Image (cartoon, grey):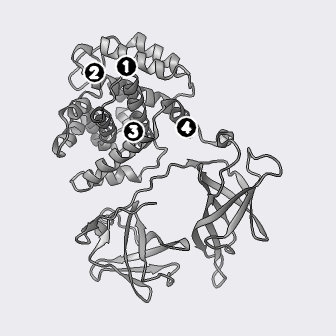
């Protein structure tokens, strides 16, 4: 993980993360990283804004090293600062580092896959939480481990019999759960293990254990053929966009968005729309950095207004809206009917936004036959950039909801349904993308 080193001049950004939450004490995760690795604790805390203190309870943490920055994570937002420990209280300083974001993409596993782990002479079973090419995260129930312990991993699906993988424990998250009053707390741990020499087996062999949505996501990652440089550019553009939003009145929408699960429709299809938009644009030779950044920015902003009612973002048409109106609030109906205008208004208020971005956002619900909205224009008045986003958004929506992963057949259906030269070009490029 990487901390953004920019300093905030006052504590307002910290206290803003509690403005919409009345539940106290707050769930709080704290950690410190030193040369020996990272230790993480999960606890609860009261935030005393009047005295600029954080009071740690249940359990109180007294092992904070005041010579190292400590990281606090509340309400999907994290802050790091040098701490001043006063008993169970942590004094909040005037200067703190800005929030961090996790950059590594991991595969979340389901169905409780287990793996046998050997630490020195101790052997225990860990439940796999997530996995990547570089490492694995496990849930275990033994506290008798520490940072930098060498481990051997065996008996994971896809590994050959008698095969073992070597690694080292790089972080520990400790959870304390009280069983009975007066009894010792039950300590469980989430541990991160960095693999030293690679897995030695095909990581895709465990994909059958993935949830349907994650499986589809991995399939598109494979066929999208983005280069490492393009993936990095995508991530950097998203981070820049989010950093930009934090300093505006739209910060609350961003916080709501980041609070959603990554597998939720609103977040998942935004990510997938960006990946598909870049991939299809490459097939069309629209490969300038400026053009790709426009599509990424549009994907970040296009459904941001739905973060308070994410289910509404899944409604496809005004016909579907009419069928659902009795189940929706007036606010939800208003957001759905006006979100192209609201989304383009967000872009208009942000500095240095291209007029192309505003237009794509305004036309995102238009259709080539004129049955879309807000203007009901046909393909002759929908821009080429908007045509690409409309199709890629439709493809992402199909990937999320449909059990059929034959994307070429779906593209052919779209080509029969969507008339107009710009739409033909985009759909033909998508067919080329999915030809494998």
- In the picture, the quarter occupied by the C terminus is top right
10 Å crowding of disc 1: few (<14), some (14-19), many (20+)? many
Q: Which residue is mark 4?
A: 218
Q: Which residue is mark 2?
A: 384
Is residue 343 shown left or right of residue 2? left
Residue 379 horizontal/vertical position (percent): 27, 15
Q: Which residue is mark 1?
A: 426
Looking at the image, tell me whether mark 1 or mark 4 is earlier in sequence order.
Answer: 4
Q: Secondary structure at mark 2?
A: helix
Q: CA distance from mark 4 to mark 3?
A: 15 Å
User: Which residue is depicted at the point 49% across and 52% down?
Assistant: 104
Residue 117 horizontal/vertical position (percent): 73, 61
10 Å crowding of disc 2: few (<14), some (14-19), many (20+)? some
Looking at the image, tell me whether mark 3 or mark 1 is earlier in sequence order.
Answer: 3
Q: Is residue 91 above or below residue 398?
A: below
Would residue 327 be visible to someone looking at this image?
no
Front of the two marks 3 and 1: 1
Q: Secondary structure at mark 1?
A: helix
Q: CA distance from mark 1 to mark 4?
A: 23 Å
Looking at the image, tell me whether mark 1 or mark 2 is earlier in sequence order.
Answer: 2
Q: Which residue is mark 3?
A: 270
10 Å crowding of disc 3: few (<14), some (14-19), many (20+)? many
């Amino acid at each position: 993980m990487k901390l953004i080193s920019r300093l905030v001049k006052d504590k307002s950004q910290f206290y803003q993360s509690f403005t919409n939450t009345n539940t106290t004490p707050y769930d709080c995760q704290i950690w410190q990283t030193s040369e020996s690795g990272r230790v993480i604790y999960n606890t609860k805390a009261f935030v005393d804004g009047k005295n600029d203190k954080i009071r740690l309870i249940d359990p109180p943490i007294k092992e904070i090293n005041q010579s190292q920055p400590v990281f606090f994570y509340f309400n999907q937002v994290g802050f790091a600062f040098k701490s001043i420990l006063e008993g169970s209280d942590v004094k909040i300083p005037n200067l703190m580092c800005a929030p961090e974001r996790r950059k590594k993409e991991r595969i979340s596993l389901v169905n409780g896959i287990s793996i046998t782990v050997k630490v020195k002479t101790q052997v225990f079973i860990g439940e796999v939480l997530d996995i990547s090419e570089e490492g694995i995260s496990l849930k275990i129930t033994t506290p008798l481990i520490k940072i930098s312990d060498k481990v051997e991993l065996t008996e994971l699906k896809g590994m050959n019999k008698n095969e073992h993988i070597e690694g080292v424990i790089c972080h520990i998250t400790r959870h304390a759960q009280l069983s009975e009053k007066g009894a010792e707390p039950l300590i469980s741990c989430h541990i991160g293990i960095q693999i030293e020499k690679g897995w030695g087996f095909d990581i895709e062999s465990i994909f059958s254990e993935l949830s349907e949505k994650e499986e589809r996501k991995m399939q598109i990652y494979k066929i999208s053929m983005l280069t490492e440089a393009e993936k990095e550019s995508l991530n950097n553009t998203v981070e820049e966009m989010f950093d930009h939003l934090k300093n505006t009145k739209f910060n609350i929408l961003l916080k709501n968005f980041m609070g959603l699960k990554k597998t939720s429709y609103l977040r998942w299809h935004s990510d997938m729309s960006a990946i598909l938009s870049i991939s299809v644009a490459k097939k069309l030779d629209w490969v300038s950095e400026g053009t790709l950044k426009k599509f990424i920015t549009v994907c970040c902003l296009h459904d941001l207004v739905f973060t308070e009612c994410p289910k509404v973002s899944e409604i496809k048409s005004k016909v579907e809206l009419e069928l659902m109106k009795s189940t929706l609030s007036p606010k939800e109906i208003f957001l759905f009917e006006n979100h192209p205008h609201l989304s383009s208004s967000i872009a208009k208020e942000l500095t240095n936004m291209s007029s192309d971005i505003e237009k794509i956002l305004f036309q995102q619900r238009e259709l080539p036959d004129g049955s879309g909205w807000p203007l009901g224009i046909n393909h002759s008045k929908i821009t080429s950039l908007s045509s690409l986003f409309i199709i890629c958004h439709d493809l992402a929506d199909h990937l999320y909801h449909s059990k059929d992963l034959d994307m070429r057949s779906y593209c052919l259906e779209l080509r029969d349904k969507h008339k107009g030269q710009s739409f033909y070009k985009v759909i033909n490029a998508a067919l080329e993308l999915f030809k494998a």
